[in-house]
Amino acid sequence: MENFKAFRVHTVDERPVCKFEQLSLDDIDDGPVLIRVAYSAITYKDAMAARGVGKNVRTDRPCVTGVDLSGTVIRSADPRFKEGDRVAVTNYQLGTYHDGAYADYARVPAEWVVPLPDTLSLFEAMVLGTSGLTAALAIDRLQQAGVRPEHGPIAISGASGGVGSLAINMLAKLGHEVVAISGKPEQSGYLREIGASKILSRDDFMRDQAPMVSGAYFAAALDNVGGQFLDRLCANVKPHGKVAIAGMVHVETKMTVLPFVLRSVDILGINVSRQLQMPERQRLWQRMGEDLKPTKPDVIAKVIPFEALDRTMDSFFEVSSVGRVVVEVTEQHR
């Protein structure tokens, strides 16, 4: 196999140096499943790795980053997969401690690989990726906790981000009234287009600091931010409401127990890393190809060529990124 293009992070004087390189298979981590990568995406985790924030990528040797990929199996030493299979890989150690998605080829453990439903294209799989899996898990757990459309609106914080955008679209498709909480007034049209029924200004939402807001009308919420957003969402949820928390932009929060004791509010923790077992992953991917399949993939996702990867990373720190950024790693014809 000829050399191929890859985007690697090197650590030089304890600082990340990112660059495109020509590699061979011998240069990337081993694994029984060889995948020709079609699409990847940019997540906040990828941007952190590229810019040395949070120390979430190995430093003992260069690493091909990219925590999400969709592609086609070229060969497999594991009988569960065969040449031509369409697959996705998200999370685990992909792109952090194991060479990841930002390369024409990836070699990965079979235990990380999910066969794609026939109803999802390789492009649609990366419109979803880690963000879609997170949104799907949150919605699935809210449903298991008894939340139904007739119970009232569901609030989404961090609404214009990847998880927030996909959750809005999925919930609207299921018939829920969705309230988007956003600090980007210029994105109101976008949020309504993907399914939000109402948009609340972040500043207006955070203004009422009562431990339990009178007249609370949210049946449930999905928090993609953390910190005081979690406190305010819990304070605005009706009795027996559910709050799924998937974000940790802000880790620390100061809150009272009143919503949990006096209104019987429940918190559901959402984590799609290695703690999400493969049978659950496969079930959620199946749902993402069926009732949770996005109806507005071309609105939610911006597609960039592989060459634009590095210069796009900074938008995640400038808080200018909206929806999903899908990377066309190898040329595709959607």
Image: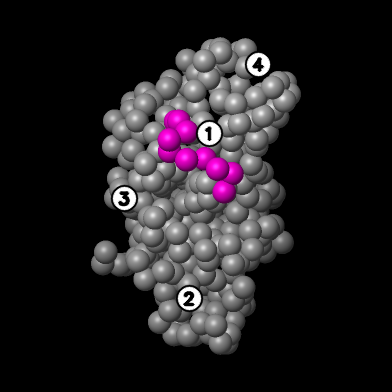
The residue tagged with tag 3: helix, strand or loop? loop
Q: Is residue 288 left or right of residue 121?
A: right
Residue 4 x, y percent position in the rendering:
44, 73
Q: How far apart are marks 3 and 2 (CA)?
A: 28 Å
Q: Which of marks 1 and 4 is nearer the N terminus?
A: 4
Mark 2: secondary structure: strand
The N terminus, quarter of image: bottom left
Element carrying mark 4: loop
Residue 211 marker: 4
Q: Mark 3 points at which residue?
A: 295
- Name the element at disc 1: strand
Q: Residue at x 58, y 15 (%)?
A: 213
Magenta span: 144-154
Q: In this view, does 164 lie above or below 86?
A: above
Query: Which residue sits at x=52%, y=70%?
Result: 114
Q: Which mark is residue 220?
A: 1
Amino acid on which disc 2 is placed = Ile
Give percent across and percent down for residue 122: 37, 66
- Give the mark nearest the N terminus, 3 or 2: 2
Q: Are marks 3 and 4 in contact (CB under 8 Å)?
A: no
Kind of residue sitting beneath label 1 = Ala
Closer to us: mark 3 or mark 2? 3
Identify the residue under disc 2.
Answer: 35
